[in-house]
Each structure stands twice: as structure tokens, then as C-alpha cells.
Image: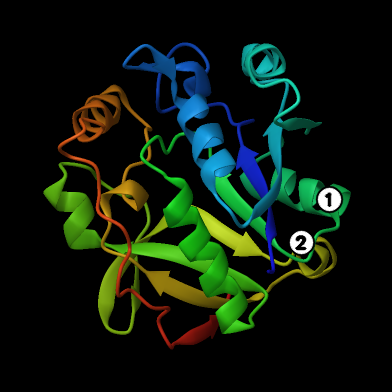
Amino acid sequence: MRKADGLIMAGGKGSRFGSGEKPLAQIKGRPIIDYVVAAMMQARLVRWIYVAVSPHTPNTARHLEKAWRGSVRLIHTPGAGYIEDLRRTAATLHSPAILVCPADMPLLRGDLLDFVVESFFETGKPSLVVVVPLWLITRLGLESPFTMKVDEEEVAPSGVNVVNGIELASRETLEESYLKVDVEAFAVNVNTVNHLKVAERLLSPTKRSIPLEGHRPMRKFMKS
């Protein structure tokens, strides 16, 4: 059974969110990042769990060392930006499959992440980008700062990706495949206080998104 290493990106400034470190913002009395770590731990196809922290998130690092000692491994990055920190981390891990998740997606679950990892290995490409239809983001009362068209449909990157870390560390661009899913868990990134309220509402037991039954990778491959 092929597996990926899990990587949670938790070193950003979180400037859109406001005061405090965004990964530690509370939903139902629990830090956002704890939901993401728990989802990674539930995933059968995640081997090791790493969290990239930076000088912007010292309290997040301390929380992880205390709450998840032995379950996650911290990687300290300079906080130079998402892409730069990701490339540095990929070079450190030297892994052929890295499941990358932002620290601000509290609706993720283990079975959803397993589906993404399986799809990555099915495509055979060095990068899989999970995208969600723009209509789903709008329906939830959210917005996306970036959209694109794939197979003639307007979509937005969810922030969840799987990459060949060896190639990412050594090449400027990777050939991408796209996995389109209309599941709420991939549509909610907590970037503002309003997003926090949406996530809290959707975390209600009666509102959890359904499993990804029937969804398959999009058969359109593009170069980034």
C-alpha cells in the first residue's frame, strides 16, 4: 500500500485573520490546527505527520510540542512565504509523496485525505491539486482570492495538494493534475472571523460533509 507523508503548513502570518496566530484560533473550544492533525492521524495512507512552523507562529509550535508530542514532527522554516517554505520543507523531507494541507481547514477528515492520496497515485503526475467549484464556495457564503477554469468550470484551489517532494525541491515547475470535489470540507479555509463562524456551523454533527463516493480525478492535465 503506497502512502504519503503528511505536511501541515502552519507558518504563515495570517494577516487576513487579525490578531493572534490563526492555527490556534478556537472552534468549539479547540484550536483549528488540532482538527487538521486529527484528520491526518485518521488517514490510513499518511505515514508520518510533519508541521511546518516559523518565527510567525511560535505559540503554535509550543502548543504542538505539548499537545501532540510523539504524534507530529516540527519543521522550522524561515516564514519567507508559503511556496518558499514548502520548497524548503520538501527538500528536508525528500519524500516522493507529500500530502500538503493548510493549518486552517478544520473540516478535513481521514477518509477524505485518503481519497486525495489515492488519486495522486492514480494520476501518475508529480503534483495533484484539489479544487472545488466556485459555486460551492459562494453557496457557503465564502469567497476565494483566486479562481481558474478547469474543464470549462470555474474552480478554486482548496489548499490541499499532493506533490512529489523530490521533484518540487529540484524543479521550478511541476506538471499538475486536478481533482475536482464538491465537498464542503475542501471549501472552507478559515481566513477571516466570518470563515470561522461558517466552519463552526458546518462542524455540527448534522452538517458534516458526506464521503467522497463516486468522485474521480479530472482527466485534464496541465503544466503549472
Residue at the image position 76 percent from the left and 25 percent from the top: 70
Residue at the image position 86 percent from the left and 57 percent from the top: 94
Q: In this view, does 118 lie to the left or right of 86?
A: left
**Residue highlighted by disc 1:** 93
- Whole-percent x and y of residue 182? 26, 62
Please, is residue 196 above or below residue 7 in the view?
Answer: above
SS for dot 1: helix
For the C terminus, the quadrant is: bottom right
- Whole-percent x and y of residue 161? 55, 59
Residue type pointed to by label 1:
Leu
Residue at the image position 52 percent from the left and 83 percent from the top: 222
| Circle nearer the N terminus (1, 2) | 1
Residue type pointed to by label 2:
Gly
Task: Specify the quadrant of the image occupied by residue 203.
Answer: top left
**Residue highlighted by disc 2:** 165
Q: Is residue 98 left or right of residue 219?
A: right
CA gap between label 1 and label 2 equals 7 Å
